[in-house]
Amino acid sequence: MVHENLGSLTLLAEIPADHLRAQPDVRALDALAAPDLEALEAFCRTGSLRQAAVVLHRHHSSVATRIAHVEDALGWPLDDPAGRFRTRLALLAHRLAHRT
């Protein structure tokens, strides 16, 4: 993600990393296995299972299985705009929480 393209989301960078790490959605992302987190990031970046599969060089059904597992682990759906927004925000907070 390019900083200049984030607009008001850059305000999240002002939140102390320990506060971000304590946020339940960020903790839920921390609990995901690396391949699940990678699939989630690709899905959110591309907006589709098939495009995420292309990016990840995986079959779309294996990406769909991972995304279904992620939905179960997170406890909210990714097939609606609110769920995708929550996820994208959580992913950004997760990155900021673990920045070096």
Image (spheres, grey):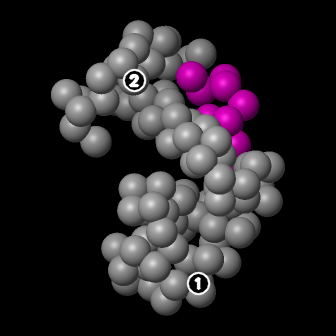
- Residue 82 in the figure: left or right of residue 91: right
Q: Against 5, is 78 above or below?
A: below
- Magenta segment includes 8: no
- Measured as percent of width and height from the top left, residue 45 is found at 40, 56
Query: x, y percentage for residue 64?
Result: 61, 77
Label placed on residue 95:
none
Residue 22 lies within the magenta run? yes
Give the answer, above or below, for where 92 lies relative to 62. Answer: above
Please provide percent x and percent y for residue 44.
47, 55
Quick one: label 1, few (<14), some, or many (20+) residues within 10 Å? few
Label total for image: 2
The reply, left or right, for residue 42 in relation to residue 62 is left
**Label pair 2/1, CB-CB below 8 angstroms:** no
Residue 37's place in the image compared with 54, above or below, is above
At label 2, counting other C-alpha atoms closer than 10 Å, the crowd grade (few under 14, some 14-19, many 20 or more) is few
Residue plotted at (22% across, 37% down): 2
Secondary structure, mark 2, is helix
Quadrant into which the C terminus falls: top left
Tell me the distance, in whole angstroms, between the alpha carbons under discs 2 and 1: 32 Å
Nearer to us of marks 2 and 1 is: 2
Q: Nearer the viewer, residue 77 or 73?
A: 77
Q: Which residue does the numbered mark 1 point to in the structure image?
A: 62
Bounds of the magenta span? 20-31
Secondary structure beneath disc 1?
Answer: helix
Q: Is residue 11 visible?
A: yes
Question: Which residue lies at the image location 57% right of the left edge and 22% below the top edge?
Answer: 20
Q: Which residue corresponds to the image point at 40% horizontal and 74% vertical from the top-left?
A: 51
The picture places residue 92, in percent across and down from the top left corner, at 45, 35
Q: Earlier in the sequence, mark 2 or mark 1?
A: 2
Q: Which residue is mark 2?
A: 9
